[in-house]
């Protein structure tokens, strides 16, 4: 291979500034300018040219070849009008041929134009970028370089236009979520939590089916995480067909309002698992820094046991030791202590126990909601809070995987049913069979 002298080497700037050869310019015709701006701009120009050809072919089919009389034609040409198509997250103007029916019934639509005119792709692009954290002010800066000629006439990229599109698309997401039928869903676990959006509280529900699939179920808005809001949410799930007759394990963060709502709608015998991570934080908040690590270790050691009575005994012992020096921590530990051990009482062990002993599965969905709503500065209404929350829940659903320990969820559902049967008045209690991880 021969060497290349320094005089023959072309820098990147020089290469970019070179004119296309006359032969290439002749082949490209009117697209030569777009080719200088890059391959994507050239591709866009070719695509718009193909669209014009498609519409022209359809006009010829309806009206016959231009300049020739065709007595069997179904329509006649009627000039052209302004139109637009969706391209790379923007609306691009195009010239649309017009044809009118021969029988005088009016203008006929062109199927080739209708195929590309839909705004759904634009709404999808806007929603995806907003969910990724792009603000409406920065939306235009993320546009693909489609060429200066196309960009000059592009629209639907201003802050207000993007905002309107996002509002419309999140309304659709909210409607889809609240209209979902749940008749065919067999839940093993129901998780409920609240998230603050401005001055509004959205209480959201996440289900885990017996196959280990996480499902966003619904949400409800209120001024606080109170019993009425949570009751309305759970009642709505039941109205949409959620079967709770066979029993379900409810995992809550410890809010009394949520517990009261579960008891009111699903019954007092519904097993409730108090999130151990929330309980741990609540207890440690009452302690000085030098004691937190040792107490945390003892709490986690008790919750790691598979024997209910032994775990309960260790927690009671810890509460008794804290009573004199830190009564606040002791009271926090005793409040709902038994409910932090519900999964142990049901015989859940292994990876499934790690999954359902806390609200971590729903917390990941809450993080997705927070990302969706982080660019909103003024919350004007409850409906405005529900829209991005619903969009965030559906976005999180796209990222969900089956939960750890899902193979034992069917056994958990059976254990819950046996627990409910055993706690009915007049029923002899029996020990729940352990669910041992495979």
Image: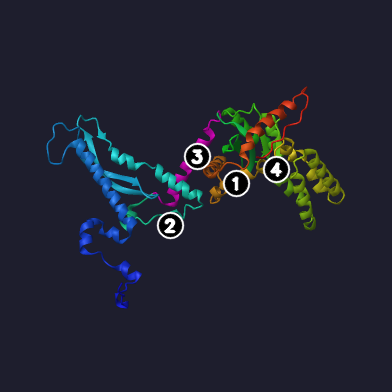
- Mark 4 vs mark 2, CA separation in Å: 43 Å
Residue lying farthest to the right in this orientation? 324
Residue 199 shows up from this direction: no
Asked whether the beta carbons under mark 3 and mark 4 sit within 8 Å of each other, the answer is no
**Does the stretch in magenta take in 180?**
yes
Which residue corresponds to mark 3? Answer: 173
Which residue corresponds to mark 2? Answer: 141
Indicate the quadrant containing the C terminus: top left, top right, bottom left or bottom right: top right
Tell me which label, 3 or 1, sits earlier in the chain: 3
Asked whether the beta carbons under mark 4 and mark 1 sit within 8 Å of each other, the answer is no
Instruction: Please state which of the two labelled residues, at mark 2 or mark 1, is closer to the viewer.
Output: 1
Asked whether the beta carbons under mark 4 and mark 2 sit within 8 Å of each other, the answer is no
Residue stretch in magenta: 156-183
Which residue corresponds to mark 4? Answer: 275
Above or below, comparing residue 13 to residue 127 in the picture: below
Tell me which label, 4 or 2, sits earlier in the chain: 2
Residue 228 in picture, x, y percent from top left? 66, 34
- Mark 2 vs mark 3, CA separation in Å: 26 Å
- Mark 3 vs mark 4, CA separation in Å: 29 Å
Which residue corresponds to mark 1? Answer: 364
Label 3: state its secondary structure.
helix
Residue displayed at 77% across by 45% down = 302
């Amino acid at each position: 291979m021969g060497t290349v002298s320094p005089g023959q080497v072309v820098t990147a700037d020089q290469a970019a500034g070179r004119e296309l050869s006359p032969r290439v310019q002749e082949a490209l015709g009117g697209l030569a300018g777009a080719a200088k701006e890059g391959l994507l701009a050239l591709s866009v120009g070719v695509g718009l040219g193909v669209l014009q050809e498609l519409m022209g072919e359809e006009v010829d089919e309806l009206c016959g070849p231009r300049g020739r009389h065709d007595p069997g034609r179904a329509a006649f040409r009627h000039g052209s009008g302004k139109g637009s198509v969706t391209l790379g997250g923007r609306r691009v103007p195009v010239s649309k041929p017009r044809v009118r029916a021969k029988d005088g019934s009016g203008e006929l639509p062109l199927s080739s134009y209708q195929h590309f005119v839909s705004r759904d792709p634009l709404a999808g692009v806007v929603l995806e970028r907003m969910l990724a954290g792009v603000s409406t002010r920065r939306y235009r800066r993320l546009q693909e370089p489609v060429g200066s000629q196309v960009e000059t006439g592009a629209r639907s990229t201003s802050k207000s236009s993007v905002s309107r599109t996002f509002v419309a698309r999140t309304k659709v997401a909210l409607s889809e979520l609240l209209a979902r039928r749940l008749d065919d869903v067999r839940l093993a676990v129901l998780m409920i939590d609240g998230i603050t959006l401005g001055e509004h509280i959205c209480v959201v529900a996440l289900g885990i089916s017996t196959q280990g699939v996480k499902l966003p179920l619904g949400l409800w808005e209120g001024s606080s995480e109170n019993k009425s809001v949570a009751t309305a949410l759970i009642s709505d799930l039941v109205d949409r067909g959620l079967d709770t007759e066979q029993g379900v394990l409810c995992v809550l963060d410890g809010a009394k309002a949520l517990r009261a709502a579960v008891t009111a709608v699903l019954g007092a015998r519904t097993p409730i698992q108090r999130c151990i991570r929330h309980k741990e934080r609540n207890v440690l908040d009452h302690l000085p820094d030098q004691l937190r690590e040792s107490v945390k270790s003892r709490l986690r050691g008790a919750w790691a046991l598979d024997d209910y009575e032994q775990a309960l005994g260790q927690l009671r012992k810890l509460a008794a030791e804290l009573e004199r020096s830190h009564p606040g921590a002791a009271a926090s530990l005793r409040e709902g202590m038994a409910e932090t051990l519900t999964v142990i009482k049901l015989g859940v062990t292994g990876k499934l126990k790690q999954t359902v002993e806390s609200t971590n599965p729903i917390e990941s969905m809450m993080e997705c909601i927070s990302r969706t709503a982080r660019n909103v500065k003024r919350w004007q209404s409850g409906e405005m809070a529900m829209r991005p929350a619903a969009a965030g829940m559906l976005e999180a659903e796209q990222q969900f995987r089956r939960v750890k320990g899902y193979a034992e969820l069917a056994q958990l559902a059976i254990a819950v049913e046996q627990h409910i049967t055993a706690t009915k008045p007049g029923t002899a209690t029996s020990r729940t069979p352990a669910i041992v991880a495979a």
